[in-house]
């Protein structure tokens, strides 16, 4: 017997409601696990800018033992009562630099918690197609790059997407963001296969990915200028304590 059009419509609507409800329930049920995975990845990316990690490492334990989080403003002042996880850097990126809240991650010496061995700065920008972001670790001189970790939303595979590779990220190790008292940043050059080992402010480029490289350069210049006041104040304190 043929079913009426009304029956078919009601049946389809019921199936849609049931399936939608199940999907919504699954999404809510899985959200804590998803959030935990995102947080674990964040901690792992911060740690890898300073130290190598192995498969069996307890990321949460290492992070808790080594990293102190805080939030600062453009002037380099700590925002009391705020945690780094309170800050959505993607939203802050859309604000004027002077208005941004800036997460900060300090690697404290385990034998002397008052001593900072490394500082990790989050960075955010736009590549060829979409958002790019990452973390930059500085050594205790607050000038020399210890390591970087980059990620992207939609750069071209084999070209701009190479910013997430160890090969590209290793090029930044040992480079300097200041020249004496002036902020110079580190600039990825156009073209690839050139030796910039003797230049503290340049790294080799990526063939076919000039616009992604430009995005990384703009990201560095933007966020290093945001953290400049903090870095200068902190480096002066380090010098006075030596």
Image (tube, grey):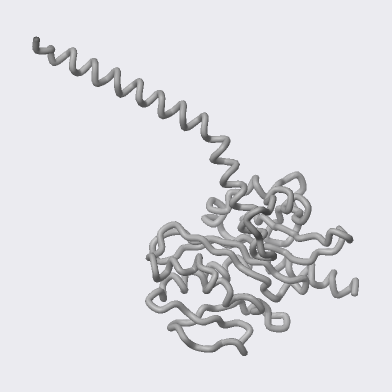
What residue is at 67 percent from the left and 55 percent from the top?
A: 103
Q: Please, which residue is most extreme toward the front here?
A: 56
Report x, y in % for residue 230: 73, 65
Q: Image quarter for residue 95?
A: bottom right
Nearer to us in this view, 43 or 59: 59
Report x, y in % for residue 52: 66, 64
What residue is at 13 percent from the left and 12 percent from the top?
A: 3
124 horizontally vs 67: left or right? left
Nearer to us in this view, 111 or 116: 111
Report x, y in % for residue 56: 66, 53
Judge whether 43 appears above or below 229 on screen. above
Q: How many marks?
A: 0
What residue is at 81 percent from the left and 64 percent from the top?
A: 116
Quadrant in the picture for the C terminus: bottom right
Judge whether 212 appears above or below 18 on screen. below
Quadrant in the picture for the N terminus: top left
Judge whether 14 appears above or below 86 on screen. above
Nearer to us in this view, 204 or 126: 204
Report x, y in % for residue 144: 70, 76
237 horizontally vs 193: left or right? right
Nearer to us in this view, 8 or 202: 8
39 horizontally vs 211: left or right? right
60 horizontally vs 169: left or right? right
Judge whether 120 appears above or below 86 on screen. below
Q: Please, which residue is most extreme toward the left here?
A: 1
What residue is at 24 percent from the left and 21 percent from the top?
A: 12
């Amino acid at each position: 017997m043929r079913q009426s059009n009304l029956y078919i419509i009601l049946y389809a609507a019921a199936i849609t409601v049931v399936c939608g409800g199940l999907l919504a329930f699954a999404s809510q049920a899985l959200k804590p696990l998803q959030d935990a995975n995102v947080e674990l990845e964040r901690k792992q990316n911060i740690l890898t800018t300073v130290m190598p990690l192995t498969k069996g490492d307890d990321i949460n334990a290492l992070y808790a033992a080594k990293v102190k989080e805080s939030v600062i403003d453009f002037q380099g002042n700590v925002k009391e009562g705020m945690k780094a996880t309170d800050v959505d850097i993607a939203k802050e990126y859309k604000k004027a630099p002077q208005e941004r809240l800036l997460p900060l991650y300090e690697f404290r010496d385990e034998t002397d918690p008052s001593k900072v061995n490394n500082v990790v700065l989050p960075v955010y920008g736009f590549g060829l197609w979409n958002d790019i972001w990452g973390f930059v670790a500085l050594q205790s001189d607050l000038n020399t790059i210890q390591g970087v970790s980059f990620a992207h939303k939609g750069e071209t595979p084999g070209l701009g997407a190479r910013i997430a590779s160890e090969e590209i990220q290793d090029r930044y190790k040992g480079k300097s963001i200041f020249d004496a008292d002036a902020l110079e940043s580190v600039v990825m050059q156009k073209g690839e296969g050139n030796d910039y080992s003797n230049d503290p402010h340049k790294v080799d480029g990526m063939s076919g990915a000039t616009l992604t490289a430009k995005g990384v350069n703009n990201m560095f210049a933007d966020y290093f200028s945001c953290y400049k006041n903090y870095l200068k104040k902190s480096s002066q304190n380090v010098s006075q304590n030596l």
